[in-house]
Image (cartoon, rainbow, N blue to C red):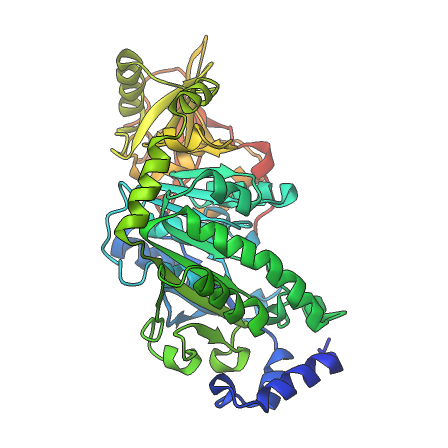
Amino acid sequence: MSLVLPENFKAHYRNLSKTNSDDFKNIEIEEFFKYCGLPLRKAFRFNQLKYRGNTGKNIFIHETEKQKWEIEPIIWCNNGYFVDRKEEVKTIAIGATVPHVLGGIYLQEASSMLPVTALFHGHENIDFSDLSVGDLAASPGSKSTQIAEKMHGKGILLTNELSSTRLKALYSNLERCGVSNSLLTHYDAENLCNLLPNTFDFLLLDAPCTGEGTVRKNFKALENWSPDDAVTMANLQKKLIIAAFTALKNGGELVYSTCTLGDPENRDVVNYLREKFPNQVEIISLENLFEGAEKAITHEGYLQIWPQIFDSEGFFVAKIRKNLNTKTIEAQNKIFAEKDKHQEEKNLKKFPFTKVTKKQNVEILEILYSQWNFALPENFELWNRDKEWWAFPKRIEHFVSNIKVDRIGVKIGEMHGKGWKTVYEFCSAFGNICTKNMLEITEEQVKKVYAGNNLDFENNSDNTKLIFNKKEAKEIMLTYKKFPVAIGKMTIAGNNLKWKNQLPRVLLRNLK
C-alpha cells in the first residue's frame, strides 16, 4: 500500500516552505513528501528496570542475536535501537516474543523517545528520592516507562490518562516493565493540574494533537486533513500547557511535545505560554541535546523533527523552566498555607488503605526476606487493605488527599487462612532483586508458562536439589536469563517437582 498525500496538505506545506521563515530554509519540501510515504523504521528501548548494569546489556545483545534482529543505536536515547529483522522472522510480531512479554524491551518509535531525553537533559545524575515527576497524557505508557527507567524506582511518578479505554493498556505496560513507583490517575489533565498546583519537579505534556507526524506508520492519519483541525486542537493545547505550568514547582521543568508538524500546535502554543507568563517562562534550548540536534533546532531552541532529517516520525519538543520572583513565591506560599488542611486530613481518612503498624511492618518484611531474601527499597513503605499488602512510594499523602488515584505502587501479596501468597506484581517489579527460591528455566518453558501450563522438573538437578527439602508446597519464582517470569507453588511428587502456574489469566498468550 502506498501513501497518497492529500493535495490540500501538500499545498499548505508548499506555501509555508516559500515563506521567509528560518525554519524552512534547510527543508526540501518534496523530500519531506517523499519521506512521508516511506515505511517507518521499527524501534524499541531495552528496559533498564529489568536489564541491570553491563551484564544486563550483554544479555540484551545476546537476545537480539538469538531473535535474528539487527540493531542500530538511536543517537538521542542511550538504550534505544532501530531494529531490522531477517526475512525468516519478519512475520513474527515483536510483541509476541519472550523479551517483549517479560518487559525486557518496549516497542517505541524513535522520535517518541526524544521528549523524555529532553526532560532530564542536564540532570543525568540527579537523585529522584524526594522528587515528583508527572506524565499528563500517558497511555499507552511509552514515555512513562521511559521516565520510570530514569528514576530507578525512586521518587513519585504520576501517570495520568483521560481515556478510560486507554487506561487499561497504560497499567498493563507499567506492570510488564516493572514500574514500582507510579500513581495511576484518570483525569482531564487540566483539572488534575489545577488540583495539584506547585507540585511537580518535572512534567511531561505530550499533548493530544492532529498527528501529522505519524503518517508513516498510519497512512490514515491525514484522511480528511484540514488546517482548521490544528486551530481547534491548539485551543485545547493552550489550556493544557497553562495548567501544566501552574502544577510545576518553582524551578521545575516542563517538556511540551507533539507528534505533529505545524506551528499552530507547536511553537504557537509554547509562545502563548511565554506571553501569559513573560517573566516566569525560561526556554531551555535543546540545541545540544544530542549530536546532530542542530539540524532540527528552531531559532527559539525548540526541536522540530521533520521525517526526512533522521528518517523517523515527525515530532516537536520544547523545554521550559518555571522561574518565579520572590514576591510571587511569597504570595503562593501564603495561599498554600491557608489551604484547608482539615479537608486534606478528611480526604486522607477516606483513603481505602492504611499505613501498616510497626508490628505488621516487621512481620511482612520478615516473610519477604525469609521467602525471597528481599529487602524493601528505602523509597517504599508498606500499606494494607483488608487481606492485601502493598508497597507504596513514600510521600503519597499529598496526592491521595487531593486527588483520586486509581492505582499506586505494587501489590506484593495477600494473607489468607492458609498463609501468605506472593502475587505476580511483586515478581515483575521486585523479582530482579530477589535471590532465594529462584529457578532458572528455558525459553521454551517460558512459552509454556505463558500458555497457562504447569511445569515438571527432575528433583535431582543441580538448580533444584538445594531448594526443596520438604514435601510441602513452596512458592518458587521462575526466571529466564535472570528475568523474573512468574511465581507458582512447587511440590515434590516422587522423583519429580511440580510447579503450579499462578500467572494471571489476563497475561496468558501464545509466544513465538
Q: Quadrant of residue 232?
A: bottom right
Look at the picture and state if 211 lies above or below 361: below
Task: Identify the image quadrant of the N terminus.
Answer: bottom right
Judge from the rendering whether residue 314 lies leftward or rightward of residue 338; answer left or right: right
Relative to residue 16, is residue 449 drawn left or right?
left
Residue 90 in sight from this viewpoint: yes
- Asked whether residue 430 appears in the rendered view, the answer is no
Q: Which residue is more in the foreground, 302 or 151?
A: 302
Viewer-nearest residue: 2 or 326:
326
Q: Is residue 192 above or below residue 489?
A: below
Which x, y percent locates residue 508?
Answer: 59, 39
Residue 121 location (% of width, % of height): 31, 63
Tell which of 289 and 503 is nearer to you: 289
Above/below status of 404 relative to 125: above
Q: Residue at x 58, y 39 (%)?
A: 451
Taking the spot 31% from the left edge, 57% from the top edge, the residue there is 323
Q: Position of residue 109 (x, y in %)?
A: 51, 65
Residue 495's x, y, as percent?
Answer: 41, 24
